[in-house]
Image (cartoon, rainbow, N blue to C red):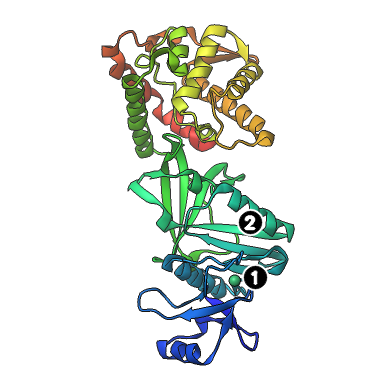
């Protein structure tokens, strides 16, 4: 903690002190209690960690976060300075007695009050949702900022986001895109990670944007429209190919639902046409890989002939209910919308690539698509290349227009 109450019941913030001498002096002359549970706390002025207050023993203080890292302490400090520089009146470690919570920072902007939580360590989803619920009960908006230091960036364009990270994903309704807001206390910089395409349940092709904190307003973080381009498209294709090869190599035969459905549809994984598994915005709606869910729609149409959009939506909902396709955001109230949006985008994409033809409100596979039919594995790369050369620009254009 960076704040505590002194014997006069005044809130002391370690911010006020610039030198070690000052700190040593108050350490010798004052005693402090926790502003939340009122238990005595000690001022620790060590050589390694930044100065902070800590409870004497492992206290049962609901708002204490013992073992706070330097990253967390520094982050609170620099986020506080950031809000202050914007002309706001932030309160460090603000205590909300009614709910027994202490936010890293409490701040009002206009008529709204925010509880800023700088999250540096993994927390379980139920803890996050309990905290969120408590704040909401006081009409306070929880504003979660994830520490950049919690991320592991393997390649610059590919990021692994665990369940923990994914709880903090935000969705911009206006731009129809997922993003993650991060902050680095070391660089005093905000980062926005825009999710372009999922490669698996946990890894994503992303775009990373750095925003020095002095350029960032509060509470409206400047989210930009983030687009797909030829470079990201190529990375996407490389991973799609890897996925196919792995699925082929490590296949478990008919126990694998996807391979079985391909087989029943007279396709095999290596001969699966290149338009199954294109980069689409809807891919982010599912944890099931794009190649899989798109193939299911394709096979269904191949088998069923002429059909309406509605029929495809019903089919997809059935697959979700059966657990064949998994939604990323498992919310019953919004899942219908996600499914309809996904089917709609898929039809639009297939039509643009001349795979599907539309007559009135009916769709069917274009019988002429046979020109792209992969008849043997040797032929495969040629067909994929031919298809991508012809349609890459169209695919990118449609992705960005959504
Ligand atoms: Zn306490």
User: Dot 1: few (<14), some (14–19), or many (≥20) neighbours within 10 Å?
Assistant: many
Q: Quadrant of residue 308?
A: top right
Kindly identify the residue that appears in the image at 52 percent across and 15 percent down: 356
Task: Return the disc, 1 or 2, that comes first in the chain's sequence.
Answer: 1
Mark number displayed over residue 131: 2
The C terminus, quarter of image: top right
Looking at the image, is 260 positioned above or below residue 84? above
Mark number displayed over residue 72: none
Q: Is residue 265 visible?
A: no
**Coordinates of residue 195 in the picture (x, y in percent):** 47, 43
Q: Quadrant of ligand 1?
A: bottom right
Mark number displayed over residue 95: 1
Q: Are marks 1 and 2 in contact (CB under 8 Å)?
A: no
Query: What is the total number of numbered labels drawn onto the structure image?
Result: 2
Element type at mark 1: strand
Question: In the drawing, does residue 208 fall left or right of residue 168?
Answer: left
**Coordinates of residue 381 in the picture (x, y in percent):** 29, 19
Looking at the image, is 204 positioned above or below residue 248? below
Question: In the drawing, does residue 269 fall left or right of residue 303?
Answer: left
Spatial separation of the CA atoms under disc 1 and disc 2: 13 Å
Which residue lies most toward the front here? 57
């Amino acid at each position: 903690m960076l704040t505590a109450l002194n014997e006069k019941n005044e809130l002391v913030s370690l911010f006020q002190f610039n030198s070690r001498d000052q700190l040593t002096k108050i350490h010798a002359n004052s005693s402090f209690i926790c502003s939340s549970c009122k238990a005595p706390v000690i001022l620790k002025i060590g050589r390694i960690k930044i100065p902070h207050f800590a409870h004497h023993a492992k206290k049962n203080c609901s708002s204490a976060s013992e073992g706070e890292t330097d990253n967390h302490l520094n982050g609170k400090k620099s986020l506080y300075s950031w809000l202050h520089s914007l002309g706001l009146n932030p309160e460090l470690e603000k205590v909300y007695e009614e709910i027994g919570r202490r936010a890293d920072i409490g701040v009002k902007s206009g008529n709204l009050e925010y509880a800023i939580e700088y999250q540096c360590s993994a927390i379980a989803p139920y803890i996050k949702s309990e905290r969120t619920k408590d704040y909401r009960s006081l009409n306070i908006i929880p504003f979660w900022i994830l520490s950049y230091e919690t991320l592991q960036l393997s390649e610059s364009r590919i990021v692994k986001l665990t369940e923990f990270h994914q709880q903090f994903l935000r969705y911009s309704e206006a731009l129809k895109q997922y993003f993650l807001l991060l902050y680095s206390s070391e660089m005093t910089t905000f980062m926005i990670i825009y999710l372009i395409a999922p490669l698996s349940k946990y890894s994503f092709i992303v775009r990373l944007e750095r925003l020095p904190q002095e350029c960032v307003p509060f509470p409206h973080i400047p989210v930009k429209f983030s687009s797909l381009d030829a470079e990201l498209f190529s990375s996407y294709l490389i991973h799609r190919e890897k996925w196919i090869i792995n699925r082929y190599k490590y296949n478990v035969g008919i126990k694998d639902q996807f391979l079985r459905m391909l087989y029943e549809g007279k396709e095999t994984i290596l001969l699966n046409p290149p338009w199954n598994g294109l980069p689409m915005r809807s891919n982010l709606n599912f944890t099931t890989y794009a190649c899989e869910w798109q193939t299911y729609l394709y096979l269904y149409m191949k088998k069923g002939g002429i059909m309406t959009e509605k029929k495809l939506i019903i089919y997809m909902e059935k697959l979700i209910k059966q657990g064949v396709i998994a939604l990323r955001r498992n919310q019953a109230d919004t899942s219908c919308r996600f499914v309809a949006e996904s089917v709609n985008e898929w039809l639009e994409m297939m039509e643009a690539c001349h795979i599907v033809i539309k007559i009135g409100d009916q769709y069917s596979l274009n019988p002429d698509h046979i020109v792209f039919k992969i008849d043997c594995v040797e032929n495969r790369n040629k067909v994929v290349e031919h298809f991508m050369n012809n349609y890459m620009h169209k695919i990118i254009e449609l992705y960005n227009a959504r």
